């Protein structure tokens, strides 16, 4: 499995929100972009995970998983509240286009 990561500070390059093809609004934490394509101006971190590996993705980072069709892969995602009130305030301001 390959994991592609983009830092939280490059959020504006991810075109968050927008609309699905059926006109329904995307959530602010969803990007229609494929991290593999069209992101020449971002610094993308890519890593390969093998059997038994685990990865921690920091709060507000963007990620995309690339899983081959022939692999037996189980992905478990756990969302949690950010412990840093400062980080939460800054990122909420960025998400709401205040900063």
Image (cartoon, rainbow, N blue to C red):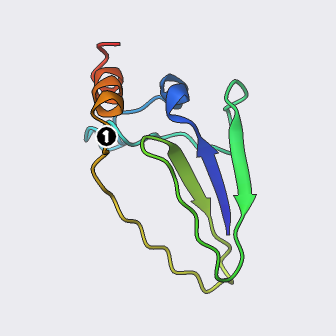
Look at the image and tell me in which quarter the C terminus lies: top left
Residue 26 showing in the rendered view: yes
Q: Residue at x 52, y 27 (%)?
A: 9
- Residue found 67% across the figure and 32% down from its top: 39
Q: Is residue 78 left or right of residue 69?
A: left
Image point (50%, 34%), residue name: 8
Q: Secondary structure at mark 1?
A: loop
Q: Is residue 62 above or below residue 1?
A: above
Assess disc 1: are there few (<14), some (14-19) or many (≥20) residues with their C-alpha within 10 Å of its C-alpha. Answer: some
Quarter where residue 43 is shown: top right
Image location (x, y in percent) of residue 63: 54, 49
- Which residue is tagged 1? 26
- In this view, the residue farthest toward the top is 99
Picture coordinates of residue 97, whole percent (x, y): 31, 17
Tell me if residue 56 comes above or below residue 28 in the rendering: below
Task: Work out which quarter of the rendered image holds the N terminus and state it.
Answer: bottom right
Q: Position of residue 24 (x, y in %)?
A: 25, 41
Residue farthest to the bottom?
Answer: 72
């Amino acid at each position: 499995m390959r994991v592609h990561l983009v830092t939280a500070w490059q959020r504006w390059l991810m075109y968050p929100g927008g609309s699905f093809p059926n006109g329904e609004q995307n959530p602010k934490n969803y990007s229609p972009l494929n991290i593999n394509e069209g992101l020449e101006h971002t610094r993308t971190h890519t890593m390969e995970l093998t059997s038994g590996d685990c990865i921690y993705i920091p709060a507000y980072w963007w990620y995309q998983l690339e899983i081959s069709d022939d692999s037996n892969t189980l992905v478990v995602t756990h969302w949690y509240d950010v412990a840093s009130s400062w980080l939460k305030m800054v990122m909420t301001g960025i998400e709401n286009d205040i900063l």
